[in-house]
Image (cartoon, rainbow, N blue to C red):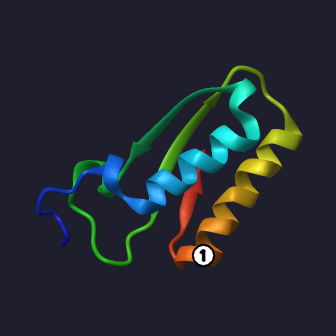
Amino acid sequence: METSFYKPEQDEIVIFFLNELKKNISENLKNVILYGSRARGDFFKHSDYDFLIILKKKNLQIKELIYDIGYEVLDVFEKLASCI
């Protein structure tokens, strides 16, 4: 486990993901919550990133953009970003 003093706000993948969300859907973005093993700090090296994304309005186009950002994380960092 990679538990020693994990700070999500300093994690390059969390920062990248949040910046991409803000850049692409900031007008409809209400909140983003990291949950799961990364949030608890009991993750392993290959653990995924679990994000709960709260939008102001449902929109299929925005949903697709969010999935695209998740795929970009996988492409760039070889880590899975799961979004609900």
Q: Amino acid at mark 1?
A: Val
- Mark 1: which secondary structure? helix
Q: Is residue 71 left or right of residue 4?
A: right
The spot of residue 31 in percent (x, y) is: 54, 28
Residue, far right:
61
Q: Residues within 10 Å of mark 1 (few under 14, many from 20)?
A: few
Rendered position, 48 above or below 25: below
Give the residue displayed 18% in from the left and 72% down from the top.
1
Rendered position, 75 above or below 42: below
Image quarter (top left, top right, bottom left or bottom right) of the C terminus: top right
Residue, far top:
56
Question: Between residues 49 and 69, which one lies in front from this camera angle?
Answer: 69
Rendered position, 55 above or below 15: above
The spot of residue 55 in percent (x, y) is: 67, 27
Give the residue displayed 56% in from the left and 53% down from the top.
17
Question: Between residues 25 and 40, which one lies in front from this camera angle?
Answer: 25
Residue 23 sits in which quadrant?
Answer: top right
Q: Is residue 32 left or right of residue 30?
A: left
Give the residue displayed 51% in from the left and 47% down from the top.
51
The spot of residue 30 in percent (x, y) is: 60, 23
Give the residue displayed 81% in from the left and 40% down from the top.
62
Task: Please give the count of numbered marks on the rendered protein.
Answer: 1
Residue behind mark 1: 76
The spot of residue 37 in percent (x, y) is: 31, 57
Q: Is residue 8 left or right of residue 57?
A: left
